Image: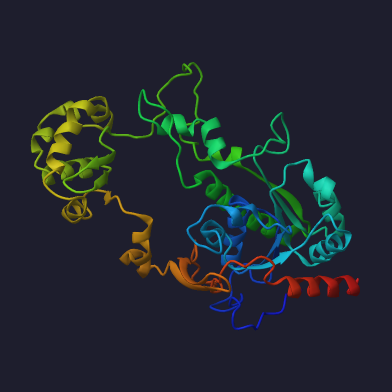
Amino acid sequence: MNTVPTHASPASNPQPGTGGVGPLAGIRVLDLSAYIAGPYGCSLLADQGAEVIKVEPPAGDNLRKYPSTLATESRAFLGVNRSKLGVVLDLKQSEDLERLYALVRSADVLVHNFRPSVPARLGIDYERLASINPRLIYCAVTGYGDKGPLKDKAGYDQVLQTLTGMCTLQGKQDGPPEILYGSVVDYYAAALLSGAVSSALFERERSGKGQSVGISLLRSALAMQSARLVWAEGEPSNIGRDMRSGGITGLHPTREGYLYLSANTVHFWTALCRKTGLDELLQTDRYDTVRKRAQHRDEIVPLLRQALQRHSALEWESIFGEEVPCAAARSVEDMFDFPQVQAEDMIAEYTHPVVGAYRGFKHAMTFSRTPGPDPFAAPALDQHGALVKADADRLRHED
C-alpha cells in the first residue's frame, strides 16, 4: 500500500502510526461521504489503524456548516471525522477525477453516501472503480437502499426514525410521537459500516476479490428494532410492542434530579423495594412478576416516586449501588471527567490548526494486542490537499 507522507508542520495534526499498530494497519480508505453515518463509520476504521483520506468537494462536507458554538468549525464535524487526512477534489473537473482514480488504484476501501443515481454521473460507480481496482471494497451509504420506489430519496436520521415507527414507540401512551435526538440511526449505520467493511476485507483475504457493500439508514433503523419487528402468524397488527418492561422501568423524579431505574429480575425488584422502604410490595403476588408489575404500573409508580423524594438522584445512585440498575440523569459535559470514562481512557486531547486545543472522544473499541494508533483531530478543509494530490499525481505517473 502507498501511504501519504506525514505532515511535519508544528500546527498540523499528529499522524497515524503512533500509539500502536491497529488491526487495520496498512489499509487505505477513501472517504467521500458527508454528514454522520459514512464519515463516522470511516473514523471507526481509522480507530483500528486504517489510513483514511477524507475527500471533500470545494464547498466542503455540509456538516461543516451546521450550527455550532465554535466560531471556526462545526463541533459535529470535529466529532465524527477524527483521524483523517483531508483533501478537496472537484470530481466534475477531469484532473481531480483522474487523481481520484489514481488513489483508487492504491486504495482498499471507498465509502460514499451519494444517492444511487449519482455515482454513475460522476464516474465513480462500482463497476467503473472495480475495473480500476478489482480488490476494492466499495461501500455505498444510502437512505433507503439501491432498489425500490424510494431509492433516490434523500435519507436523514430523524426522517427514518419517524418513518419506521421509532418515534411512535418512543412517545408516551396516547401522546404524540417523539424524536430520539442524537442521530442514533446514523451512528448505528456507522457501526454497521465498520463491521461490514471489515468483514469484506477479511473475505478478500480468502478470495482476492473486492465487492460492493450496502448500508442504508432504513436498514439501520429496522435493525435497531429487531426485538419489536416480530409479527407471529395470527397476531393482530396493533399488538403491544413496547419494550419498556416491568412498568417501573424508566426515568423518575427525585428530590433533586431524575433517576433511571430498571428492576426486572427478582433480585433487583426485591432490592428496590427494600431500599426504598416499600417492603409491603413484596408481600403480595400481585406484583411478583415483570408482567404483573407492568399491568399494575399505575399502582406502583406513585408509591415509588413518593419514596424517591427522600433523596437526590445522585444519593439514590449511592444507596442502590450495584443492587439496583440505575443512573442519575447527567449532561454529556459530565462525561469528560467522569471517573469511569477516565479509567477507560475514552477522552483524548486534540490540536486543530484552526480551532486550537480541544478534548473529544478517543476510540470506540479496544484491542489487547493491536491497540491502534493515537487519534488526531479532524482535518481543516483541504488541510492535507498538497500532500494527497502529490501522492495521487505520483501514482498517475507510475501507471
Q: Is residue 1 visible?
A: no
Q: Is residue 351 left or right of residue 45?
A: left
Image coords of residue 134 (percent x, y): 83, 58
Task: Name the residue located 17 percent from the left edge and 32 percent from the top edge.
Answer: 302
Q: Nearer the viewer, residue 379 or 376?
A: 379
Colour pattern of the rendering: rainbow
Position of residue 355 relative to residue 309, above or below, is below
Task: Name the residue located 72 percent from the left edge and 75 percent from the top edge.
Answer: 4
Q: Quadrant of the N terminus?
A: bottom right
Image coords of residue 50 (percent x, y): 64, 67
Q: Nearer the viewer, residue 2 or 158?
A: 158
Q: Is residue 333 left or right of residue 129?
A: left
- To which quarter of the image does residue 13 belong? bottom right
Q: Is residue 314 left or right of residue 106?
A: left
Task: Name the residue located 53 percent from the left edge and 44 percent from the top edge.
Answer: 185
Image coords of residue 153 (percent x, y): 68, 35
Q: Is residue 305 visible?
A: yes
Q: Quadrant of the C terminus?
A: bottom right
Image coords of residue 57 (percent x, y): 73, 57
In the displayed orientation, state which residue is furthest to the front.
71
User: What is the number of callouts on the image?
Assistant: 0
